[in-house]
Image (tube, rainbow, N blue to C red):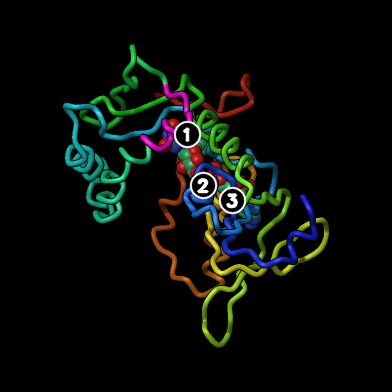
Amino acid sequence: MKTKGLTIPFDIIVVGSGAAGLYAALCLPSHYRVGIITKDTLKTGASDWAQGGIAAAIAPEDSPQFHKEDTLNAGAGLCDESAVQFLVNHAGTAIESLVEMGVAFDRKGKQLAMTLEAAHSHPRVLHAADTTGRAIVSTLTEKVLQRPNIEVIAQAIALQLWIDPNKQCCQGLSVLYQGQIHWIQASAVILATGGGGQVYSQTTNPAVSTGDGVALAWRAGAMVRDLEFFSISPHRFNPTRGAPFSDQ
Ligand SMILES: Cc1cc2nc3c(=O)[nH]c(=O)nc-3n(C[C@H](O)[C@H](O)[C@H](O)COP(=O)(O)OP(=O)(O)OC[C@H]3O[C@@H](n4cnc5c(N)ncnc54)[C@H](O)[C@@H]3O)c2cc1C
């Protein structure tokens, strides 16, 4: 991690190195100079703890329409339908891309194994033993570290978005790194800072889940909504394993 690197403008800064941040960085064209800012080590986030699995309607007898109906039913009228539609439309290709990158989801014979869980009407939950998140994050991390256009700046805390007062657009951000505040220039900033469970007295979220991305965006003038649904995970803590585990 070179402090020197922080003075050169980036094309894009991604804040957060969970599944969302790593995947976003890998989806960007390789001619962009990309920086991933993460406030602890690369693998410290909720993604590494996710165990139960990841849903996608990819079985031949299943369909995105069934996935959508199940999600809307489970949401009891509270879902944002366009977000659900986006999710079910893109879940299949996202899984395909993870498999291509090498994520070792469990298999039944040659086919991906899928379980029937929770409110799903079809078996569509893919998993890698009971460490699905870890399998995804490990593969994505490996890919990120192989990409010469991506620089990882670890133990750096994003503090504030840098708004151009004339154009009212984001031109970078400030970061606390090695005891100093640095202003990093970037044409775009992607906030992938995960959940905010730590703002509650009881949570299964890791210590880094303090809702920073929402606070950064809000302080920069963004409208925030549906905060009561902000990263809630129905899991309990298993003290013998030192990490939470799924009830499912
Ligand atoms: C115990 C548990 C079990 C779960 N099980 C499942 C499951 O089975 N299936 C499922 O779909 N979901 C599950 N979830 C939910 C799932 O893990 C999360 O929704 C998902 O991992 C979020 O990914 P993310 O990349 O957005 O956030 P995270 O993985 O939390 O990553 C956030 C990143 O942002 C960084 N960061 C935060 N603030 C700053 C800052 N100011 N500056 C720099 N970096 C910052 C953090 O260090 C971290 O790298 C579970 C969650 C928990 C806690």
Residue indicated by mark 3: 16
Which callout, 3 or 2, points at the residue further toward the start of the chain?
3
Q: Main secondary structure of the magenta part?
A: helix
Mark 3: is the Cβ under 8 angstroms from ligand 1? yes
The image shows residue 130 at horizontal and vertical percentages of: 48, 22
Q: How far apart are marks 3 and 2 (CA)?
A: 13 Å
Type of amino acid at the residue the image marks with label 1: Met
Helix, strand or loop under label 3: loop
**In the rendered view, does 215 fall on the left or right side of 155?**
left
Could you say which quadrant of the image residue 183 lies in?
bottom right
Q: Give the range drawn in magenta.
A: 96-105
Type of amino acid at the residue the image marks with label 3: Gly
Residue indicated by mark 1: 101
- CB under 8 Å between callouts 2 and 1? yes
Mark 2: is the Cβ under 8 angstroms from ligand 1? no
Q: Nearer the viewer, residue 159 or 58?
A: 58
Type of amino acid at the residue the image marks with label 2: Leu
**In the rendered view, does 67 fall on the left or right side of 55?**
left
The image shows residue 237 at horizontal and vertical percentages of: 55, 28
Residue indicated by mark 2: 26
